[in-house]
């Protein structure tokens, strides 16, 4: 590889981030990633209180000195954003990933403390904005990402960002094997953020039904919906998803038509969607709404996270 600013910045062995996954990512997954030479991220919203979030950070710190991060939703749907930011600053986490809003306040709070800030972006315009604000890296969320995704394929998005931005670009979406890592690097990315294939890990806390679905379904079964959180995201096209449909309903139409109500409707939809995801992920229910990306195609069994990760590395390095 060419000089990798991301690896130098992080001080880790492999330029791989185990992505923050709502309701799924936990301390066991983060520790397995750190022990394997990569890094990982906890979503702040996976913890009901700031005390629980702080406890998770301290648990990881007690077992590893490697850098890890926390994902922060920075728009109005996250009612605990301010207190979560204070918690992350007090704990001096290695880095923060911002999503779904402006990172300006996060950058101003974190940078003086030496906390790196990486920002999710889906286009060049937003990437240039966050770089100007002082972001340390940009996470290029492409159209193959699981959960919330962007409109552009990596083949279009990454070269645009690499050509115009001067900070590391991290490719997020569609990583299922080592070949996909090589493709991202050939386009100019310096690291990859990988999520879906790690849901099929022994450490992931989701139900056996969810994990079995990852094996049983394939890329052709992934659909894009805006009905659940107010933002487009990818889910497995289960019978329940087929029943409720993926096209805009009443709340979604109001979201786009009424600017005054927009922030309140989006908040309501986010809360409603979170409850649906939680029920489906951890219990037996016919209302199965399971997030996943097209890289589900590369899941064939449930394995420890370190085996999944190191197989990725072996494939990437060996050219398989």
Image (cartoon, helix red, strand yellow):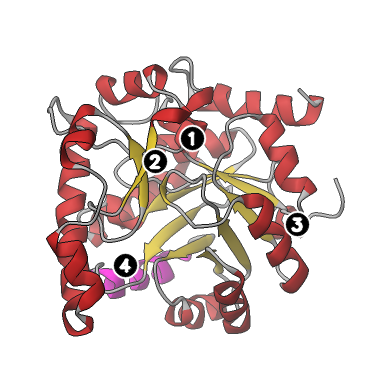
Q: Work out how far the residue at label 4 is from the one at label 1, CA to CA, in angstroms.
A: 31 Å
- What's the mark number on residue 84? 4
Q: In this view, does 256 lie above or below 55?
A: below
Precedes in sequence: disc 2 or disc 4 = 2
| Secondary element type, mark 3 | helix
Precedes in sequence: disc 4 or disc 1 = 4
56 relative to 251 in the view: left or right: right
Q: Which of marks 1 and 2 is in front?
A: 1
Q: Work out how far the residue at label 2 is from the one at label 3, CA to CA, in angstroms.
A: 24 Å
Precedes in sequence: disc 1 or disc 3 = 3
Q: Work out how far the residue at label 1 is from the one at label 2, CA to CA, in angstroms.
A: 25 Å
Precedes in sequence: disc 4 or disc 3 = 3
Residue that label 3 marks:
8
Q: Residue at x 36, y 50 (%)?
A: 233
- What's the mark number on residue 27? 2
Residue that label 1 marks:
294
Q: Which residue is drawn at 27% across and 20% down?
A: 208
| Along the line of sight, the residue nearer the viewer: 267 or 150 | 150
Q: Work out how far the residue at label 4 is from the one at label 3, CA to CA, in angstroms.
A: 28 Å
The reply to whether the C-beta atoms of the residues labelled 2 and 3 are less than 8 Å apart is no
55 relative to 243 in the view: left or right: right
Q: Nearer the viewer, mark 1 or mark 3?
A: 1
Position of residue 63 measured from the top left corner of the image (x, y, whole percent):
48, 40
């Amino acid at each position: 590889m060419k000089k990798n600013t991301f690896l130098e910045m992080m001080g880790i062995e492999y330029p791989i981030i185990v992505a923050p996954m709502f309701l799924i990512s936990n301390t066991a997954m983060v520790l397995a990633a750190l022990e394997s030479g990569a890094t990982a991220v906890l979503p702040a919203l996976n913890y009901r209180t700031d005390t629980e979030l702080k406890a998770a950070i301290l648990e990881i710190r007690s077992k590893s000195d490697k850098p890890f991060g926390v994902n922060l939703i920075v728009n109005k749907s996250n009612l605990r954003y301010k207190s979560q930011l204070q918690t992350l600053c007090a704990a001096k986490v290695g880095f923060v990933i911002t999503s779904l809003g402006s990172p300006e306040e996060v950058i101003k709070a974190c940078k003086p403390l030496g906390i790196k800030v990486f920002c999710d972006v889906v286009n060049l315009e937003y990437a240039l904005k966050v770089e100007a604000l002082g972001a340390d890296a940009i996470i290029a969320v492409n159209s193959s990402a699981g959960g919330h995704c962007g409109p552009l394929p990596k083949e279009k998005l990454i070269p645009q960002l690499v050509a115009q931005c001067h900070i590391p670009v991290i490719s997020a979406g569609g990583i299922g094997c080592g070949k996909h890592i090589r493709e991202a690097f050939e386009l100019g990315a310096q690291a990859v953020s990988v999520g879906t294939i790690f849901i099929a890990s022994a450490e992931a806390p989701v139900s056996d039904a969810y994990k079995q679905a990852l094996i049983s379904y394939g890329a052709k079964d992934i659909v894009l919906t805006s009905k659940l959180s107010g933002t487009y995201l990818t889910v497995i096209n289960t019978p329940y998803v087929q029943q409720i449909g993926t096209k805009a309903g009443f709340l979604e139409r109001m979201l786009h038509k009424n600017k005054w109500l927009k922030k309140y409707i989006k908040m309501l939809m986010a809360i409603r969607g979170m409850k649906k995801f939680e029920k489906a992920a951890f219990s037996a229910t016919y209302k199965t709404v399971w997030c996943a990306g097209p890289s589900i195609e590369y899941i064939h069994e449930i394995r420890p996270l370190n085996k999944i990760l190191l197989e990725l590395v072996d494939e990437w390095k060996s050219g398989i």
